[in-house]
Image (cartoon, rainbow, N blue to C red):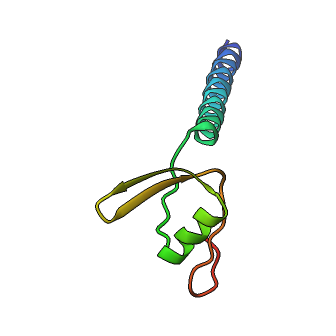
Amino acid sequence: MNKKNKKPDNKVLNTILSNIFIWIVIVVVAFSIASNFSSYEKIKNVSYNEYKKLIENREISSATLIGNNFKGELNSEISIEDDNGRIN
């Protein structure tokens, strides 16, 4: 009788563990999908010269000027090279 009792317990335990594993996978996949589709703003400070180049190339779709601060939205994602030659 003990052997018969142990087999169903193992079966129940295996079922519970497999359900937990499946839920963990579902949650991880859901977070991955949500993070890929979430919209977020990338903020990058640019120099005045970089700003002028963006204007000349018509890469700014909208702009707001408040005091000395300029906030613009680009038409598409671009890479900006800093003074040290690094691309951001």
Against 38, is 61 above or below? below
Q: Position of residue 86 (x, y in %)?
A: 63, 80
Q: Position of residue 68 (x, y in %)?
A: 32, 66
**Location of the N terminus (image quadrant):** top right
Near-viewer residue (20 or 63): 63
Near-viewer residue (23 or 38): 38
Residue furthest out toward the bottom: 84
Against 31, is 64 above or below? below
Against 47, is 44 above or below? above
Near-viewer residue (4 or 61): 61
Near-viewer residue (51 or 77): 51
Residue furthest out toward the front: 56
> Residue sitting at 55 percent across and 41 percent down?
39
Left or right: residue 59 compared with residue 68: right
> Residue sitting at 53 percent across and 77 percent down?
49
Left or right: residue 45 compared with residue 75: left
State the image quarter where residue 19 is shown.
Answer: top right
Left or right: residue 2 compared with residue 48: right
Q: Position of residue 57 (x, y in %)?
A: 67, 63
State the image quarter where residue 60 is shown.
Answer: bottom right
**Location of the C terminus (image quadrant):** bottom right
> Residue sitting at 67 percent across and 23 percent down?
10
Against 14, is 56 above or below? below
Q: Position of residue 52 (x, y in %)?
A: 55, 70
> Residue sitting at 65 percent across and 75 percent down?
87
Whether residue 84 appears in this view of the structure is yes
Whether residue 47 appears in this view of the structure is no
